[in-house]
Amino acid sequence: MPQGNTTNTSDNYDYFAPVAPTGYTFKSTSSAVTVQNFPSGTVNPNQINISYTPLVQTGGFTFNYDPTAQRTPAVPTKISVSGVTDQLFSASSLNVQKNLTDKVLAGYYIYKITSASGKATSGATTDATIKAFFALNPSFDTTTANNQYQVTLAPTNQLGQVSFDYNNSIPTNPPALPSTIQLSGLTGSDLSFVMPTLEPGYVVNEVLGPDNKTYSSVTEALKANDHFTTGSNNFKVTIAAEKQMGTISYNWASNVPGQNGVAGELQATLPSSTSIWGYGGEQLSFTPNIPKGYAIDKVVAPDGKTYVDGSIQGKTALEAAQAANPRFIVGANNFAITLRALSKDITLQVNIDQSSGNGAPTAPQPYTIATVLTGAPIDATSIDKAQNWLNDWITNNASGWSIKDFLSPYRVSYGSLKDAVAGAGGVAFSEVNIYQANLVYNGKIDFSSVPTKIDFGENTISSVEKSYQGVLDNSVVVSDTRATSLATPWTVSVAQTSPIQEVMSDTGAPVMGGISFMNYLSYDGQVLTSNPQIIHSTTSGKTGDTVVIDGKSPSLFTLRVPIGFQKADANFKGTLSWTLTSAP
C-alpha cells in the first residue's frame, strides 16, 4: 500500500531479496505474508525470511620439512579437504586432525602450520601444534588459495649410547673400561662420537652398530651408521688386549770353540730363534732351547739390561732376566741369549778283562787326559802323557797284561790312544768324553833269577898269567807264563857295561890310574864287551822256567889276569847287564 494511504485496501507487493554474499547462493524465501498492523512494541509479523546456501569450498595441507633437517624422507602427500564457505575446518567432512597426525612420519613432528597469508602456529609436539592451529577456528574462505596451508615437519630428538666391554682374551686385572658415552641428535642428523684413548696394549676388537652388524673399527661402524634414526642408535665397542710379540734369539759367546776363529769344532747347531706372544700384563715365561755341552752365558732382556749368573743373588742369568721381566710389556719382548761352551773332562778309563787271566789287578781310577771347553781340541801333549801314564801303570801294576785296544767315546776300536782321539775328531764332545783302554792278560816272560854277584875269589900273586872262573850266587832262570799260542822265541844276552877295575876299599870308587880288566873277561871263550853277547836262545816259544845258567854248575865266566895286573891288597869290581829279548 502506498505510503500515506490510510484506507484499508488490499494490494500485492513485490520484494527483491538482497544479492547473496560472496561464497553463497540464493536458496529460498518464506511464503507470502499479509501485511498487518501491529501495536508498537510487539513483534513485527510482517517478515519474510530469505535463505542463502554456502558454496562448496576446497582446501589442502601441503607438507614440507624444516630446512635445517638432514636426510629427510619423502614428503608426505598432500591432504585435500572440502567444506562450505565459512565452515570451520574442524567441522569438515574429513577428520583433519587425525589425517594430519597420520601423515607424520616416525622421528618427526608437526612443527608449524602456516596459512596462505603467512600466519603460522607452532608447537613442541604434533598434538600441540594441531591444537594451537584449531584454536584459531580456521574456516573455509571463498578464495581457494586462502584455504591452502603449509605443514612444516621437524625432526624429533633421538637418543643412543656407546657402551664398552672386553672380549674373552684379556689378562687378569685389565684396566677399567671407558665410561659409557651418551648420544643425542635429531632424526637424520649426523651421528658421531670420539673414541676414548685406550690404555697402551689395548685395541678395538669389533664394534656392534645400531644396524646390528659387526664392524672391525669405529670408523667403519660410523660410516655405515652415520646419522640418528628412529630405531636403535646404540654402539657396543668390544675391546681386546693387543698381542705383544717377542723373539728368543741365540748367539755364541766369543770364545766358543769352532766359531769366530776359535780353534775347534762346534758340537751343536745354534738354536733357531723362536717367537713368543702374550697380552700386555700377562705372565711371560719360556723355556730356552739349550744344546747339550753348552750353557747360558748371559741374557739381554726386554728391559735392555744384561743378566749373568748372580745378577740377582741366587739366580742364574735366565732366572734373573725372567724375574726382572715377568710380564709382557707393550712393545718388544725380546730376549737375546748368549751361549758359552761348558768345560769337559776328557778321561781314560782302564778296563781289565778278568776272564783272560788269573790275579787280575784292580783297575785304576779314570785318568783325566785334559779339561777343555766343548768342541775344543785335545792337545797332543796331554794325549802322550795319558799314554805314558797307562804304560807306567801296566808296568808297575799289571805285569803280564797288555793293551788289547782303545775305544773312542763312539766305541770305535783303535790301536793307540792317539789314533782313538784323532779318529773321534780330536775335540771334546758335548756329552760323553770317555776313552777306554781294554787290557787282556798275555802272560809275561822275564828273569825269575839272575846273579847279583860273580865272585872270582881272593888269589895269590903269581909270576905267571892266571885265569880264574867266577862263581855265580844265583842261577840265570827265564820264566815264561805266556799262553802257548802267544809264546815266541827269546834270547838271553850279557854285556860288560862296566869293566872290572881297581876300586877303593872303603868307597868302592874307581882308583885313578888303577888296573882295568877291559877285554879280559870272557864267557864261554868269548870276550865280553859293552855290546850284548847272546849266551842262550830258543827257536820257538817255550813256556815255563828255563835254566839258562845253573849257578851250581861250573861257571863259563873266565877272568884272565896278566902278571902285571896281579897286585897285592887290591880290590876289583865291574858290572854285567843281563838282557832278555822276546821276539814279537
Image: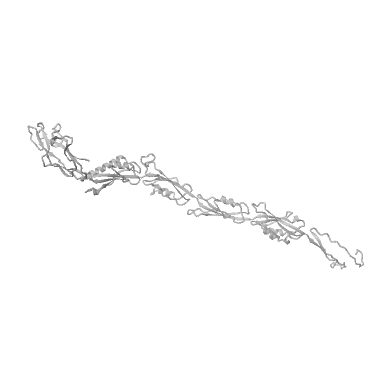
Residue, x 26% and y 42% (percent of image)? 389
Name the residue nearer the viewer: 81 or 97. Answer: 81
Q: Where is 263 relative to 164, above or below?
A: above
Q: Report whether 415 appears left or right of 137.
A: left
Residue 352 or residue 36, whichever sits in front: 352
Quarter of image, res 544: top left
User: Which quadrant would the C terminus be assigned to in this image?
Assistant: top left
Q: Is residue 437 visible?
A: yes
Q: Taking 86 as reference, is 541 left or right?
A: left
Figure coloring: one colour
Q: Position of residue 58 (x, y in %)?
A: 75, 58
Q: Position of residue 392 (x, y in %)?
A: 24, 42
In the displayed structure, would residue 217 be above or below residue 102?
above
Q: Residue furthest left?
A: 463
* Quadrant including the N terminus: bottom right
Q: Give residue 312's position: percent from left, percent from top.
A: 40, 48
Q: In the image, residue 272 lies at what x, y percent?
A: 42, 45
Q: Is residue 504 visible?
A: no
Out of 234 and 275, give the one closest to the viewer: 275
Corner quadrant of residue 425: top left
Q: Give the image quarter of residue 77.
A: bottom right
Q: How many marks?
A: 0
